[in-house]
Image (cartoon, coloured by chain):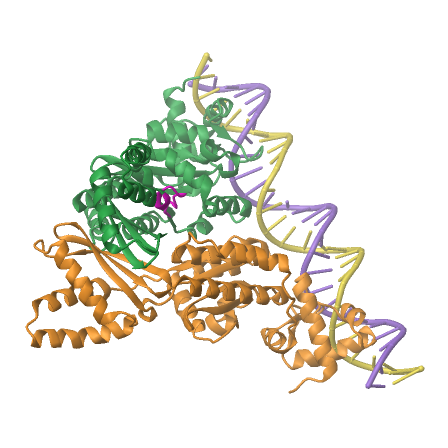
Chain colours: A green, B orange, C yellow, D purple
Amino acid sequence: MDLEAREIEVLNIIVQAYIDYATPVGSRHVAKKSTLKLSPASMRNIMTDLTEKGYLTQPHTSAGRIPTQKAFRLFVNSMLEPIALSDKNRESIKNVLVQTDLDFSELLETTSKLISSQVSQVGMALAPQTKLARWHQLDFSLVRPGLAVAILVFHGGIVQNKLITLDEKITADDLKKYSNYLNDTFKGQTFLEVRLNLIKEMKEARDQFNALYIKALSLIQTAFSEKENREIYVDGTLYVFNQIDQHDLSSMRELLEFLEQRSDLLELLDKVSESSGLLISFGNEFYGPKLENWTLISTPYQVKGETMGMIGTLGPINMNYSKVVPLVDYIAKMLTDVLDARF
Amino acid sequence: MDLEAREIEVLNIIVQAYIDYATPVGSRHVAKKSTLKLSPASMRNIMTDLTEKGYLTQPHTSAGRIPTQKAFRLFVNSMLEPIALSDKNRESIKNVLVQTDLDFSELLETTSKLISSQVSQVGMALAPQTKLARWHQLDFSLVRPGLAVAILVFHGGIVQNKLITLDEKITADDLKKYSNYLNDTFKGQTFLEVRLNLIKEMKEARDQFNALYIKALSLIQTAFSEKENREIYVDGTLYVFNQIDQHDLSSMRELLEFLEQRSDLLELLDKVSESSGLLISFGNEFYGPKLENWTLISTPYQVKGETMGMIGTLGPINMNYSKVVPLVDYIAKMLTDVLDARF
DNA sequence: CTTTAGCACTCTGTTATGTCGAGTGCTAAA
DNA sequence: TTTAGCACTCGACATAACAGAGTGCTAAAG
């Protein structure tokens, strides 16, 4: 099942041509591009072999060949030659991200837009799972009796606020005491740890009959046990119009549906976030035939060495990987740098 | 240029038919539907008159007639008969909006999604202009020396937070003093008024050589003089796939471009927000021929009697106005109720 | 055994042609 | 003023013809 050297060369040429022209590749073109100096007829023989081995398909009997997903997998895994970014390009990317006045959400949104405009494809950025973010500080701000805003600041400068209703008798001083106690108890913990420890603390507090603790804990529990509303930024969806064959409108529709209906998307992005580096996934692999012909390139970003979320781009399977991969990679590195500089 | 009674009836029938079937309406259909008991030939004469007066067009010589924008304008202004919402429908809408755990942004997002799903069209909701929102309360939360979060709560429960850098010597107590002073000074004022008064206060403080005041004022100034990042929620963009003739993909593209590129959209929505009630605007009127065949239905919502922003829906010019108009209207009323109940 | 030239074959896309049906505009009569 | 009748127009659809691209196969050459 392994490929001979010249089969690999032919496959490489075909993939490259398909990336450049997005049209079935014929034997003549391969013969011209190849260093092997073979005739189209010979190329045809090789291409037949590659077809039998599952690397090429024919849209119809007398058309050229199109690389299969299997071919693209091989291509990105072992034939891809990234093109280095120009200094100018690096510079301009850096400048966009190093704007001090952006808060965390804005930074992610900017990143998503940046990716999109740089690669002319859908760009995206996923905020960290709250449960992985580390508690830095909690404050309450009493709005009126019975209503307060809870402000949780996480490592990396992520700020979340939430309206919470409370007993009308609770004063600003009470809240101050609560937050002091909670900060002492939970500082530096991840959300997951907080949730675990909450239960323990609750029990201990009850044992000690400590009303203060119990109130504080139940406050924070209702505020943060809710469904988390993850932020996903998706930009440049309009690029799919340029990338689609006018014929299969349905493929475009599938993609847009996938992007709009966030739950599957979120699940996917969370999964790829776990990767330790840049990941190339094909639609077929992560969503089935509905998204065949689409590729997700994703890479996680870190804060203080901890993976927080991911950024990436979604484009046609015949996108220009040599350009896109280094770009996404570089942007992730810059984002990580910027976030590390924050706290 | 005025229309005779029977011309109005014919036009009404044609508009209705075009709303129902989205296809050119022929004289036979009009003759069947009309109470006038005229033959198709007579209808043709009337239709010719209406065409000359600019209310109908023909896609080609031997096709039926299509109502022009002028016809739709007349229709929505004086022929529209809204269909009352069912109690069940009212109830379900109310239930969605009366979720106490939604903060202001979530409420708007929910509203936009609600509109979209109810009318099967693009739904949208626009957050208030910050400059019109009334200051309720400001709090600072010191994150670490030199960095704080400012939390501004506006009337209606709108919460904004912003990271601000400050002198490392400033303590939490200092910040408490600042916020006390600022709240005393600016409570209940709109952003616009705040900006005006800032300058005045600055001057007075300087005259009094009051370092505290000056520091507090300059803090709030940098934090809130920035570009405001308006929130617009747009949902259900996928519905345009169902609403478009497969042929003019370009019309769809124009619309999606208009929706994605937010600046024109924002300008438009701000303008329609100023209306005192529900507004029906045709694409041609607000964006030119690129969006002809699209209609925006918008209506403002209020907090304590003050107009804050708008909600609405964007759909094909031959949408079912009788259903959509009452729905949007009712949802706006519910939203206003919910917001009023908040503070 | 590998490579290649030659050729028949297949499929797409385009253009030309004809037919059907829907709907109109016009005219002349009711 | 209304209507019946009729010629006319145009889009939609089907069919056929044809060019072009590219293949698969075979037989000969290296």
Q: D16 or B43: nearer the eye?
A: B43
B307 lies left or right of A87: right
Decide: is B195 above or below A136.
below
The picture places residue B312, in percent across and down from the top left corner, at 50, 64
The outermost residue toward the left is B209
Q: B220 or A269: nearer the eye?
A: B220
Does the magenta segment cover residue A284?
Answer: no
Quarter of the image with the C terminus of chain A is top left
Decide: is A131 above or below A41.
below
Q: How many marks?
A: 0
The picture places residue B253, in percent across and down from the top left corner, at 48, 58
Q: Is residue A61 visible?
A: yes
Does the magenta segment cover residue A231?
Answer: yes
Quarter of the image with the N terminus of chain A is top left
Q: Residue at x 39, y 46 (%)?
A: A229
Decide: is A30 above or below B200.
above
B63 lies left or right of B126: right
The picture places residue B217, in percent across and down from the top left corner, at 16, 67
Q: Which quadrant holds residue A180?
A: top left
Q: Residue at x 27, y 41 (%)?
A: A213
The stretch of residues the image draws in magenta is A222-232
The picture places residue A226, in percent across and down from the top left corner, at 40, 43
Q: Examine the residues drawn in magenta and state their main secondary structure.
A: loop
Q: A153 or B288: nearer the eye?
A: A153
Q: Is residue A125 visible?
A: no
The outermost residue toward the bottom is B1
Q: Which quadrant holds residue B176?
A: bottom left
Q: A134 or A3: nearer the eye?
A: A134
Q: Residue at x 50, y 68 (%)?
A: B298
Q: Residue at x 16, y 63 (%)?
A: B178
